[in-house]
Image: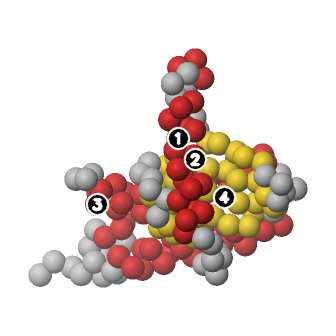
Amino acid sequence: PPERGAGLAGAPPGRGAMSGIVTVQTALTQLCKQNNSNGLRSITVTDRDGIVVLRAPESVIDDQNADQILTTIFSLTTEQTSKIQELGQANFIMTMYDNCICLQANHLPLVIRMIAAKGANAGALIELLPQVKAVLGPTKDVITRETENY
């Protein structure tokens, strides 16, 4: 018989898909803890419609409507700026608000959002982006496979 859990979410044979998701959740939570001193408050990963896939720390309760609005604004902004071919493709968009910094990046089909304190080091947030993308590799692969028929 085939091994239980083989090939799910990049998890080794014998482990279910949930253990792979938990590992990604744990890694994101760890990144938040390690960078808390740099002002990082949360990392939220949504699909392109703004539906939350992962959030760290898990205890952060945000308004689902706000997640969808922020993702929509990001998607529209990157879509519109891509029309200016001289600029090339947008890698990420950073917005400075009165109370925080919001960095959003495409990791299609996912959107990554990092929220940091107002006085956070913007450069440090940008440097963290490749680590977040690396952690999300298995999640991105699974969601890409599951949504490519839609």
**Tag 3: amino acid:** Glu
In the displayed structure, 47 sits above or below 4; it is above
Q: Point out the frontmost of discs 3 and 1.
A: 1
Q: How far from the left and from the top, in percent, is residue 2?
A: 16, 77
Q: Residue at x 57, y 46 (%)?
A: 74
Could you give the CA–CA distance between mark 1 and mark 4, rounded to whole angstroms?
18 Å
| Disc 3/disc 2 C-alpha distance (Å) | 25 Å
Residue tagged 4? 114
Residue 28 shows up from this direction: yes
Mark 4 residue type: Met
Q: Residues within 10 Å of mark 3 (few under 14, many from 20)?
A: few
Residue that badge 1 annotates: 76
Q: Are marks 3 and 2 in contact (CB under 8 Å)?
A: no
Q: Residue at x 63, y 77 (%)?
A: 61
Q: Which residue is mark 2?
A: 73
Task: Provide the secondary structure element on which disc 2 rests.
Answer: helix
Q: Amino acid at mark 1?
A: Leu
Query: In the shown orientation, is residue 125 left or right of residue 132?
Result: right
Seen at 55% across and 21% down, the residue is 84
